[in-house]
Image: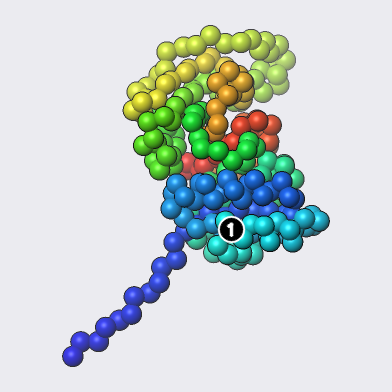
Amino acid sequence: MTAVTPRRDVRQPGLVTLVRGDVRELATIETAAMLAAVVRAQVMGCVLPMRPRAGLDLVRALAGEHVGCWTAWSDVTRGAFEDVRGLVISGHTWRAAARHVWPALERCPVYVQHRRPAPHRSVLLAVDSPGTQVALVRRLEAMMGRPELRITVAFASVPSWACSLAAALGYPIFVQRPPEERFPWPLTHGATGVSLPTTPLWAIRSLADDLRPDLVVLGLHRHRIREPWLAHPTAWHLSRELATDVLICPVG
């Protein structure tokens, strides 16, 4: 007689929505539920280890429809984010807690919610190489099958450090509205490419104002500098200031 070994229950990675007790975070929880339906994941709630806001109990009570379970931030970090498909956080909470949450970006994407919950109709993809484009498109595979989704891939040909170096050497920096250039490599199927001879920060700001996308997607490369506004100034500033939702993804 052959013994049957019971199958171990493998926990599927879920989306973790981060809150601190602001009632405006109910919109973020709704956004997390919408995203979880697209990627077929469970929504887990997590209270950030900060001074809680007065509405924490109300947020947790009203989130019952969307949040499958609640977990502690220490449990999420202790597991090296293995059970996390992504973090979802409101824009105002992100501005207050970005430094605390930022190390998670080495392990999983962070979705910063600024607009009201609604399906995505247009996405602006910021890339610096063909490899980054492939990595970010892979992150969006679940939503890219929709024919009504409009994807714009943006490339800025002036590296971020160029203006800083020019300023350090005493050269004047003239920022003008840049003309479009030819996109330097083949695009993902169905996407529109825009190449601008300027820095990534200026390019994405400009395109976000013109195109008004529902989502801006940014890639994040690993850096030895630990301060995010020094190592990743483009993602740091844009994720805090844009009116649209922002998805920041680690790309190696």
- Residue 90 in the image, given as x and y percentages of width and height: 66, 44
Rendered-image quadrant of the N terminus: bottom left
Q: Secondary structure at mark 1?
A: helix
Q: Residue at x 42, y 21 (%)?
A: 192
> Residue 189 falls in which quadrant of the image?
top left
In the rendered image of this protein, does residue 102 appear above or below residue 159? below
Residue lying farthest to the bottom in this orientation: 1
Which residue corresponds to mark 1?
Answer: 65
> Residue 10 falls in which quadrant of the image?
bottom left
Foreground residue among 33 and 246:
33
Q: Residue at x 69, y 31 (%)?
A: 241
Residue 108 visible in the current orientation: no
Q: Residue at x 61, y 50 (%)?
A: 29
127 displayed left or right of 55 = left
Q: How many marks?
A: 1
Residue type of the residue flagged with mark 1: Glu
241 displayed left or right of 30 = right
Foreground residue among 78 and 89:
89
Q: Residue at x 74, y 61 (%)?
A: 57
- Residue 89 in the image, given as x and y percentages of width and height: 63, 47
